[in-house]
Image (tube, grey):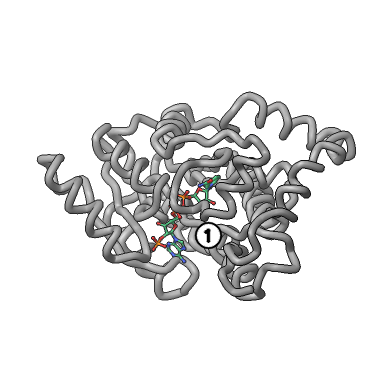
Amino acid sequence: MKIAQASVVLTGASGGIGAATGRLLIFEGARVLLVGRSKQNLLRLAAELEARIPNRVRMDALIADVTTPAGRDAIRHAAEMRNVNVLINNAGVSSFGALGTLTDAGITASVETNLLAPMLLTSSLLPHLLKQPRALVLNVGSTLGSIGVPGFSTYGASKAGLRGFSEALRRELADTSVGVQYLAPRAVDTGFNDAQAHAFNHATGSHMDKPEYVARAILKMIESEGAEHYLGLSERIAARLNALAPRLLDGAFAKHRKALKTLPQTLHAEGEI
Ligand SMILES: NC(=O)c1ccc[n+]([C@@H]2O[C@H](COP(=O)([O-])OP(=O)(O)OC[C@H]3O[C@@H](n4cnc5c(N)ncnc54)[C@H](OP(=O)(O)O)[C@@H]3O)[C@@H](O)[C@H]2O)c1
């Protein structure tokens, strides 16, 4: 799909990857509905874009929580009004730490936001998308949805679920006008990663991409309409290897376990231990 022909709903637009993606989409000629929870961040982004693009009609902002029925209804209504043909499920929350240190609320939030909300929002928008000559649902997952890494058991589970949802729905809708895509970024330099996650990524040598790099990959996926894409050659190879022979990789995570054990407990990701 040509970017100039895309009318996009972008969730998580107030965050790092979302803001970079929203900017790029608008500058490349797409019409974008920016969706976020944080009014302050969303309004700041909308004001910045308004000042930089002359054609105001290409952008709107909506405050909505994707985990609530009211939030999803508001997004569906706005999407129908704008004749949306691309849904980008990008909103997400982190859940990092050894399982025993995570709170029930944090675990629930990661599954609700990263998995349940994209499924329910896609289901809600699907009747509208199916009426479009061509439409796309692009789900932003993670390498951690394909490779189980210590410290990311619940986050990885939510993204593995999103990957499974994307694959099955893509096959289910193969003879319709709606394409389903899955993008798996590796670590990205946004507010998503707290001090502990940064310390862990540093200790384990994880590569950190800029959000603009991920935004560019999102636009390329819309243009190519490709089914899935993993960012980073070594991550792409590791994901394939892990799918074929997961036990082969089991021995590769000693440094991750060590890093997890040596994280300063007072800086815990949930902030509640
Ligand atoms: N950063 C990474 O290392 C990384 C790596 C791989 C994949 N990803 C994935 O990339 C996506 C974007 O991450 P990011 O790095 O841009 O994170 P971020 O900067 O923390 O932004 C997250 C975005 O999601 C929104 N959001 C969270 N819960 C929401 C809810 N209930 N309803 C509506 N919006 C909600 C946030 O809105 P508020 O501002 O209102 O909270 C924010 O706009 C996520 O799906 C994440 O899992 C990130």
Percent of width and height locating residue 267: 57, 63
Compared with residue 127, is residue 63 higher up or lower down, i.e. above or below?
Answer: below
Tell me the kind of residue under disc 1: Val
Please name the residue that numbered disc 1 is placed on.
93
Residue 128, given in percent of the width and then of the height, sits at: 41, 55
Dividing the picture into quadrants, the one containing residue 23 is top left
Query: Is 236 situated left or right of 41 in this image?
Result: right
Relative to 190, is 244 on the left or the right? right
- Check the image and report above or below for 94 versus 214: below
Viewer-proximal residue among 261 and 82:
261
Q: Position of residue 196 (x, y in %)?
A: 58, 54
> Observer-nearest residue: 164 or 36?
36
Going by the image, does 27 lie left or right of 11? left
- Residue 175 can be seen, yes or no: no
Q: Is mark 1 within 8 Å of ligand 1?
A: yes
* Quadrant housing the N terminus: top left
Question: Residue at (59%, 74%) from the top-left corner?
Answer: 272
SS at mark 1 in the image: loop
